[in-house]
Image (spheres, rainbow, N blue to C red):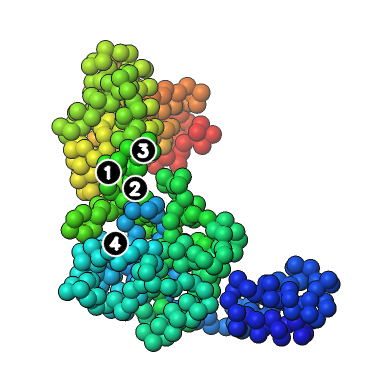
Amino acid sequence: MDALQRETLAIIQTHPENEWMPRIRNSADHLNILCDLREADIRGVLRKAEQSLHPRRVDPFSPDEDINIEPIRWMWDGVIRAGGGNLLIASPKVGKSALMMGMVGAMATGATSYLGRALQSTCPPVFVVGTDQPFVDWEPILIREGLFTGRRLQHPIKNLWDSSCELMLDERGIKRLRTLAVENPGALFVLDSYRSLIAGMGINENDSNFADPARALLRNLTDTGATWVIIHHSNKSVSGGNAISASSGNNSLPAAASCCILMNWLKATFDGSPQQDFRIGINQSGRLERCSMVVELTDDGWISHGDGDEAIRIENHAESVAQLGEGRMGDAYDHVSMRSDLGCMVSVAELAGVMDRPLNKIQRYLGGLVRKGLIIEARGVLETGGRPGNGYFTPWSKAASLWRDKRGGLKGVKGVIGEGFNPLDPHQPPLTPSPRAGARETVTVGTPVELFRNEAWCNGWLVKDNNPDAMRCVRVGSPNVTVSNLRWGLDVRACSSPFGKGVTPPEGLPELVQTSHSKHDTSWIDDNEF
């Protein structure tokens, strides 16, 4: 076994990776030990040889030692990681090569950001391994970004390989790229595409060794500080999801990269018709932070349409509206949408009058629209002459904008959750506090009150539940007698004593302290009544 281990070490140093296993088997046969070895034994010998070339730490980290961690560096913030491997996945002709050249062109001009995201401060030397297409296809991309003028490649591109050039991710090709990386510290390598760079190497993209060339590239470039971006095609069925599931071939390839970036049409066509919406969603997922944005390639270059998650919510909102059809729920949405665009909220009573339907039916329609995320329910914001009513309006409307602006001035008001605004959240706090909202803070349990009953105010009651819009009171001396669903200021008001004038309090109770209704001494109240 020792002799086989030595020969294996020589094999992996002098031969391409796809020849390692056959040559190790031949060596084992010459040593007359092949019959005694299983496939797992041969792979174990290979693993030990690789570990001897790239020794790893044996002992685990412990709390007693300092761990040196380098901060994560981004070449393009949240999209392309500097000094590591990146995998860019998209369907053919979506704009993978154009996006990378757009980033290179921006760095070449000294731009500090690209499509709304920061770029690293220095422009690295760039090597474009573009064997997937001829130079005639590269030319318009490079000219648009100012990287090819006067029949010459411009800074920062050092070399460009097109389909007429011979370069593969075999042993010789990877050694050549490593030499360039050592000579050009911090260089950027754009490899377009992975399929063209492994063609002729006898690798089936559905086999587990599909990612072996990428892993070999990673091993050879890691210590050079180079950044590499492999452009790869997605499978035919991708219409969303993430880069890992969208990657064509074996899923071992995405595992070799630190960042996986997926590009696909925001609204793809599936019936064979021409693409009408040319906006592209870019989603980065991997071992680092997540990034999402929407961009579009125009004749003058790339433009940004902002955050990807927000754009996807808007598109989903439009599709949900289209699915409502011509039914009652669709009519309800149309009225709420029309009123929202005018800056008004819609109440249940208003919609019931317009549609001539019972209130319970209207509440069902509105509840369904809220659950679908098509409208927002703002609770307790409309004055109805009685208990405050709920207001309904559509996201991204004038009413939503007014509500957000008003809400920005409610710092410290109870019920306001944070400063962010999610237009699809049906549980946002009210636009303005109820005029009785202060009662929730000032009316304490046990406060003596009077109830408005039979056209007259009657005392002898105490507050048991201090919700100002659904107050509950208990009869003094009769804990089982309660009145619920009362409104502060309409059905309930404060009084100085639960007993009428001239009435002597029950024996054993101390004299009540005459203070405001919000600060009564309630220590005399029997806790068992509550």
Q: Nearer the viewer, mark 3 or mark 2?
A: 3
**In-image side of 515 versus 222 (left or right):** left
* Element at label 1: loop
Residue type at tag 1: Asp
Figure quadrant of the N terminus: bottom right
The tag earlier along the polypeptide, 4 or 1, is: 4
Labels 4, 1: front one: 4
Instruction: Report the amino acid beneath label 3.
Output: Gly
Q: Which mark is residue 137?
A: 4
- Answer yes or no: do the residues labelled 4 and 1 have beta carbons within 8 Å? no
> Mark 2 sits on what residue?
265
What is the x, y in percent for residue 482? Answer: 45, 23
* Residue at the disc numbered 1: 277
Amino acid under disc 2: Trp
- Distance Cα–Cα, label 3 vs label 2: 14 Å
Callout 2: 10 Å neighbours few (<14), some, many (20+)? many
User: Which mark sits nearer the N-terminus, 3 or 2?
Assistant: 2
Q: Quadrant of residue 48?
A: bottom right
Residue 370 rendering spot, x and y as whole percentages: 35, 31
> Of the residues tagged 4 and 3, which is closer to the observer?
4
What residue is pinned by disc 3? Answer: 272
On the image, the x and y values in percent for residue 55 come to 62, 83
Q: Residue at x 41, y 82 (%)?
A: 181
- Given the image, on which type of amino acid does mark 4 rest? Asp
Please report contact status of discs 2 and 4: CB closer than 8 Å, yes or no. Answer: no
- Residue 180 falls in which quadrant of the image? bottom left
Identify which residue is drawn at 54% across, 67% down. Answer: 201
